[in-house]
Amino acid sequence: MTAASNSSTDASSVSHVRKPRWYRSTFYNALVLGLVNFLAPGIWGAMNSLGAGGQASPHLINAANALTFCLMVISCFFSSALVNLIGIKPVLIIGTMGYAPYAAGLYTNNRFGTEWFVLVGAALCGLSAGIFWMAEAAIALAYPEPQNQGKFLGLWLSFRVGGQLIGGAVNLGINSKLGSAGKVSYKVFIVFIILQSLAPFAGLLLTPPKKVERSDGRPVRLAIQGSNWGELVATAKLFISREFLLIVPLIAQAVYSEAVMFTYLSLWFSVRARALGSFLSAIVALAGGNILGWFLDHKPISLRTRARSAFFIVLTLQGAWWIWSTILTTRFDRTRPTFDWDDAGFGSAFALFLFLVLSFQLQYLYLYFVVGHLARTPEEVVRIAGLLRGTESASQAVSYGLGSIESFGRVGSSALNFGLWGIALVPAWFVVRDIGGRLGDRREERERAVVASEKGVAEEEQEPPRSSLEKEAV
């Protein structure tokens, strides 16, 4: 059957599709996924965006975050096997449960100086966050219609920076008079603990994949079948595939920057300037991410052109910001400033932080666009989501670990990230150039395969049972 006849068949079927009920629509589920993201990693990001988790020194928090991401590497790898056991929705809910203990650890450290609870909370967060990251990534890639993928990603990630936005606003209101270096008020963490405790209940609102109703009438398949051992082997094979290995440097470079930019904020700015940075950077990232999501969905432009042009824009901006960051941090390492918003030199130093957060959001969203066009089957969506999140975690573990070293955190991290950017360019281009070309549109191809599979099952169920004579004749 030709592509033209395929599309005409799809069009005729969609015209007879019942309008999705709002509480099972992909837009509703984007909101629910975004809400869960806001309450769990979003609030975690809000604490991080205060610089050093709101503490005066970044070194303990960087060490705790390194522990979190080390454990996430392990939990991400085994996450698809867990989906095989209990399903994607329970995995998502369980994955939210480790975030509040980490916030509690920051509270006790801020108020009482307790350090061990920070590390315990970081460990619990790492064990749960790995499976949460896989689950939300798989849902974000599998639930939306192909023509709404970018907008779904943009909306979902908007909630993540929404946590940063709310956290920055709360912190700015409480600490607006602290124009010197130091830690934020412990009262901020009480709000964060309450919000993160609500995340598992928000996860209950998610529609299970089989009950999702899409505007194109196509079903959502997001399940793993077979043995757990077979699933682990399939995940390992996908990791060593050509396309995934080539984008590993791009993934590592994209997320390595998170520790760098928030350490930068904590080292060189006053408490209220850090709160302002958390607030304004969230607005910038929210706007930029949704604009990129709209562009990646813009069908009048070919998939190949969208993939390539977004790659050049996002990666060119990344290179510019990291050159700028390396220059400034080298200067600050000599002068050791603490910028408040009415100090000379504040503007250029503060603008760099905003641009780094914007670039992180753009490249993060673009990564999901790329991996969404690498998976061939619904099962591979779950696996590649786990591998993506596991690779992210490994990179961030190294980033936060090196950031906990005082001398390296001040200047070395920016220079290293600039080097990673250069290393990632060529391998990533070998993959990006084939999207819409040699690789075709794998997102659309797996959607069609799901429709064909569901149609075949339905026809088998409707076929009347054969008589014994008919079976003998066959």
Image (tube, rainbow, N blue to C red):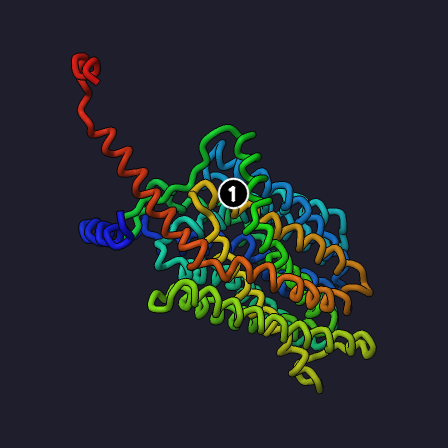
Label 1 crowd (10 A; few <14 / some 14-19 / many >=20): many
**At 18% across and 50% down in the image, what residue appears?**
16
In-image side of 97 versus 291 (left or right): right
Q: Which residue is mark 1?
A: 383
**79 and 384: which is toward the camera:** 384
The local secondary structure at tag 1 comes to helix
Q: Quadrant of residue 467?
A: top left
Residue 309 x/y as whole percent: 48, 70
- Tell me residue 244's x, y (percent): 56, 50
Compared across the picture, whether 34 is left or right of 22 comes to right
Percent coordinates x, y for residue 84 in the rendering: 48, 34
Q: Quadrant of residue 470?
A: top left
Give me the residue at 23% from left, 51% from top. Answer: 5
- Seen from the viewer's position, the closer of residues 57 and 251 is 251
Above or below for 284 versus 81? below
**Residue plotted at (67% across, 72% down):** 322
